[in-house]
Image (tube, grey):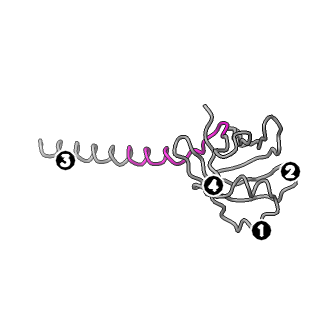
Amino acid sequence: MKTGKIALLMVGVMLLAVVLAACGSASATAKFPTGKFVNAGNSSRALQFNADGTFIALDGTFDLARGTYSVKDGVYTEESNNAGCSSPMHYKYTFDGANLKFSPVEDPAKDTCEGRKADFSEAQTWVLKK
């Protein structure tokens, strides 16, 4: 009788550990960061990512472009923009809690949008403005 209760308790503890481990790893990578990010090399340049899937590219107080984006499996996709640039375009991203970096999935030479190509190049770091 005692052995059966101990075995049941052990199974419950192991199941709980698996569930908690799965939830912890998913929440750390599933959410794309939102807010205003300033370019580390040029503080007048900024990207604003909103929780509703919209973005604004800024130069000082001027809007350079607005559009929509989506995120899935660590890939940011620019879905649309009002700058006349072809979409969609895909970028892998990394975010360490302060710095956001992008890496093009498609060949950047094929992107005819110079502003987007510059903003999403691997050379750029975007810092979350608090």
Mark 4 lies on a secondary structure that is: strand
Marks 2/1: CA distance? 17 Å
Q: Nearer the viewer, mark 3 or mark 2?
A: 2
In the rendered structure, are the residues bearing label 4 and label 3 in contact, judged by CB atoms less than 8 Å apart? no
At label 2, which amino acid type do we have? Ala
- Residue under label 4, please give it: 102
Real-space Cα separation, disc 2 to disc 4, in angstroms: 20 Å
Q: What element carries label 2?
A: loop
Q: Which residue in the structure is indicated by mark 3?
A: 7
Disc 3 and disc 2 in contact, CB within 8 angstroms? no
Kind of residue sitting beneath label 3: Ala
Image position of 53 with respect to 116: above or below = above
User: Could you give the CA–CA distance between mark 3 and mark 2, rounded to whole angstroms?
Assistant: 63 Å
Q: Position of residue 18 (x, y in %)?
A: 35, 49
Report, in whole angstroms, how far the alpha carbon at label 4 lies from the one at label 3.
Answer: 48 Å
Q: Earlier in the sequence, mark 3 or mark 2?
A: 3
What span is colored magenta in the figure? Answer: 20-37
Q: Is residue 126 magenta?
A: no
